[in-house]
Image: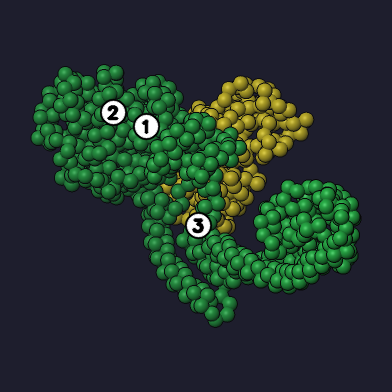
Amino acid sequence: MSEDRAASTPGGTGTRAGRPVGRTAPRSRWGCLLDGGLLHGGVQGSPVLRLFLRWVRRPLLPVIRLWRRNIQLRVVVTTLLMSLGVVLLLGFVVIGQVRNGLLDAKVKASQSQATGGFAVAKQRADEAAAATGDAASSADGRPSPNVIQWMSDLVSSLSSGGQGAFDVVTLPAGDDSRGGRGPRASGGVDPMASVPEDLRARINNSMVAVQRYTRIVYKDSDKDPQPALVIGKQINDPNGDPYQLYYLFPLTQEEKSLSLVKGTLATAGLFVVVLLGAIAWLVVRQVVTPVRMAAGVAERLSAGRLQERMKVTGEDDIARLGEAFNKMAQNLQLKIQQLEDLSRMQRRFVSDVSHELRTPLTTVRMAADVIHEARENFDPVTARSAELLADQLDRFEALLSDLLEISRFDAGAAALEAEPIDLREVVHRVVSGAEPLAERKGTRIRVVGDQQPIVAEADARRVERILRNLVVNAVEHGEGKDVIVKLAAAGGAVAIAVRDYGVGLKPGEATRVFNRFWRADPARARTTGGTGLGLSIALEDARLHGGWLQAWGEPGGGSQFRLTLPRTADEPLRGSPIPLEPKDSRRNRGLEKNAGSSGGGEKRATVPMQATGERTAATRDPIASRPAAAVPAADPTALPGNGARVVPRPGADARRQEDASAVETVKSESEGSARPEGAGARDVTQQGEARRGH
Amino acid sequence: MMSFMKGRVLVVDDDTALAEMLGIVLRGEGFEPSFVADGDKALAAFRETKPDLVLLDLMLPGRDGIEVCRLIRAESGVPIVMLTAKSDTVDVVVGLESGADDYVVKPFKPKELVARIRARLRRSEEPAPEQLTIGDLVIDVAGHSVKRDGQSIALTPLEFDLLVALARKPWQVFTREVLLEQVWGYRHAADTRLVNVHVQRLRSKIEKDPEKPEIVVTVRGVGYKAGPN
């Protein structure tokens, strides 16, 4: 049996073998199934079976999903299946009863008819035997020709008793086929084909009447075979030789009645099933519709359309649900409205204050400038005062405009005017703008990765503002060491990283640098007198682009700020072409040294030349020798977009270091390869492209 | 350069202190300022003083600055420089669309303001006779006129300068920054919305179908150029 199945299954599903499923050809998969799975016997948990199951399940997945999600479908289908089962069961029972009833009557009538017939045949035989008893014809042992005649007469007279109600057949007993023992039949019945062999055999061996169901086959091929009851018995002819007499009762009428009952039942059953399905559908709909409506309304509510409400009709449970839902929504709307009003008032106030301050400030500014221009005519104290006045007015102005900018972001009034720009131009503008400050600080600003155009859909004004902020910050905190601006593009993202080798950031500060009015060290003097809002605005600008602005830093080891922007606006970012932690970070170099890469880590790192002495001192910093495994586990703030990364990130860093050392061996002195972080595994070719970009 | 003999500036501002300060600065630079504090009286004052340039505060009592700007522009092409406290997109764009040539955001430095005023007043000293053709437009640079099929098209001096700058080098694509420098006289990168708005205004006057410009064409991602060929 199992062999049968094993043999038939491949054939049966062979028609589907053309479906492209996996890497292996379907044919060979079946081969595997036969050779491996079935021959080894154990299909439990076999990979081949699992593969097969998955193969079968795959095209069904949408259906399965619909089944899981749609309660209405589930209820209706269940109802249909169950009612179908009940109706089928009921149908079989009823049909069985009807058939028994119909046949019982017929069988009884047939039996009495047949018994009568057999008696008549026996009587006729006896009479005939008595009439020809003295005749010497029996002496020669040959059947007299009148037995043949007698037999034919018998058949016709017996069958004439019930016109069409039954037919009569005589057959020779056993294999005796002498003379007049040939088969005879009334009503055009094919005697040999209509009487089953096994019945003949049974009658041969017994002297009682035997009955059986059969099909009447007619000699006339136009007439269809009919179901019938055949009753037979072995009887002696006038010569005392046995022959077989059969009564065939056609069951045509009964079959008609039965099929009528069947048809009626099937139709009724079908109606019942369909009706039950429809009823189930309607009933479920009554419950599901409000639930779906509630779900839809809840979704719209959560999407911010707070005026959405459910329609409530009646007083039933569903209506109560709707009322409660609406009450909740109303309260929610009220609270949100209040909060929004409050926040709008506050933002409005900030905006109004900033604007109202502008007109008097303009007058003051102009007056101060006029005084400043004329300071040579003043005494030194007044002249110095005029200078201070002018300087501080600059600062006041910057603060005011930053405040206004922030309030614009808070109000959601900031609009992105994105168009394809070459970021290299922006970078060069910013760098040349920061040159004077850098010269004063003794810092050199180097731009790396600007061999190829790096184009992104961005708002040039905002990107420039972000970069100006980052570069000026880097120069300011760079302690006179080099500042490196690195550009890279990979995948759907472009990135600009600004690296300095100054005081760096303490752990935890990488998140806080973006806070409003946050200062790294309140005691530190600020030379350019920033407003304290620069990085907050930069972060908002980056967010407006759908980009990231993130910071990394180590105490004494400098910091790196990385801006990542999607290449086309509205495209979500998945990774950045530049790793946030630079390759020449102290920890990365430390690891390389541990890996025994000939101790050249420091040499490889892009350390500013003039600061070598300081750098070596810095690398002996106790923090540098901290083993990578000892760093804290997860960084909860390391979400894309919040612009924050804390320095130690062991998991990601370990991976990155492996990656980095692998790259190092290939390109020894390169300036920080652009390794797409996160997006790295996605597209190798783009990764390569990004590296070539240097 | 110093050939401008005209230096009358009408200051429309309701803030008396600022107006007075503006007066001091402007007089110090050799201009002749006159003042009006009310939007309703601005047009009358404009007709009376016939200034060479209008300094216009956008927020005014009575008629607001935008409306005043529109009224002045309806009868004159005189340069208008807006003073605005809001550099938000909408405010500035509405001001520029209503006809202002340039704007200065408060608080501004006196030098910055003066530079803008100078740039607007620096009407080129009697340019050499020059005839430019672009599309079906004929530009007479010296005569300061633009004609299509003999029909004269009225342009403000700024729009005229913009068109001439583009038409002189029809093969060149001008970035917005370059146009800002050539037409507005900005040295440093400034608000490129100025260019966008004025190109729109120019198109609405010279193009047959401003939706499908044929004379001033946008080169996506770069800037503008004159003519399709």
The kind of residue on which mark 2 rests is Asp
Q: Which residue is mark 2?
A: A659
Amino acid on which the number 3 mark rests in the picture: Arg
Q: Amino acid at mark 1?
A: Gly
Kindly identify which chain the residue marked by label 3 belongs to.
A
The alpha-carbon separation of the residues under discs 1 and 3 comes to 36 Å
Q: Which residue is mark 3?
A: A68
* Mark 1 and mark 2 on one chain: yes
Closer-to-camera residue (A480/A642): A642
Locate residue A148, reporting x and y percent: 87, 53
Tell whether label 2 touches label 1 (CB within 8 Å): yes
- Disc 2 element: helix
On residue A680, the disc is: 1
Q: Residue at x 57, y 57 (%)?
A: B63
Per the image, label 3 sits on a secondary structure element best described as helix
- Quarter holding the C terminus of chain A is top left
